[in-house]
Image (cartoon, rainbow, N blue to C red):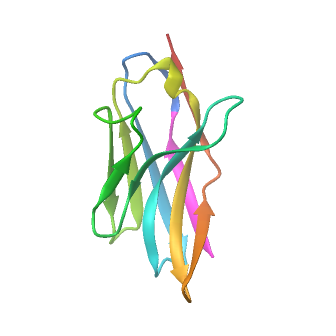
Amino acid sequence: QVQLVESGGGLVQSGGSLRLSCAASGSISGINAMGWYRQPPGKQRELVAAIWRGGITHFADSVKDRFTISRDNAKNTVRLQMNDLKPEDTAVYYCHANRVVGGSNIDYWGQGTQVTVSS
């Protein structure tokens, strides 16, 4: 099992910045991708950003040029720096990790942290 503990989030005005952090513990060997998803009110969960162990990143179009993602493989942490936040970024943000075990992909999720952007 992998445990993901998130920190950060909160309330910020439009145009402001926040940073989310996530620490992985437990059976962390084999973790490949780590990243963040979000679920806006009344909508489905969506990918925000992901980073693979080798450093390759992927961002949703809606956050490109505003969000950055970084990872510390030694500390098993991933961070999401969110700049120029907009009201539409309001959502519960979930840390995600993908681990390959015996050829099978296993997904792990954090408990979620609320991000609210006021206009």
Q: Residue at x 41, y 24 (%)?
A: 85
Residue 106 drawn at (x, y percent): 60, 73
Residue occupying the far right of the picture: 42
Residue occupying the far front of the picture: 61
Residue 88 drawn at (x, y percent): 52, 22
* Relative height, residue 114 to residue 105 (above, below): above
Quarter of image, res 114: top right
Q: Residue at x 27, y 63 (%)?
A: 55
Residue 9 drawn at (x, y percent): 51, 36
In-front residue for pair 94/42 = 42
Residue 4 drawn at (x, y percent): 56, 61
Is 49 displayed left or right of 94 in the figure? Answer: left
Q: Which residues are magenta?
A: 1-9
Where is the N terminus found, in terms of image quarters?
A: bottom right
What is the tally of numbered marks visible in this picture?
0
* Relative height, residue 53 to residue 57 (above, below): below
Quarter of image, res 72: bottom left
Magenta span includes 32: no
Magenta span includes 6: yes
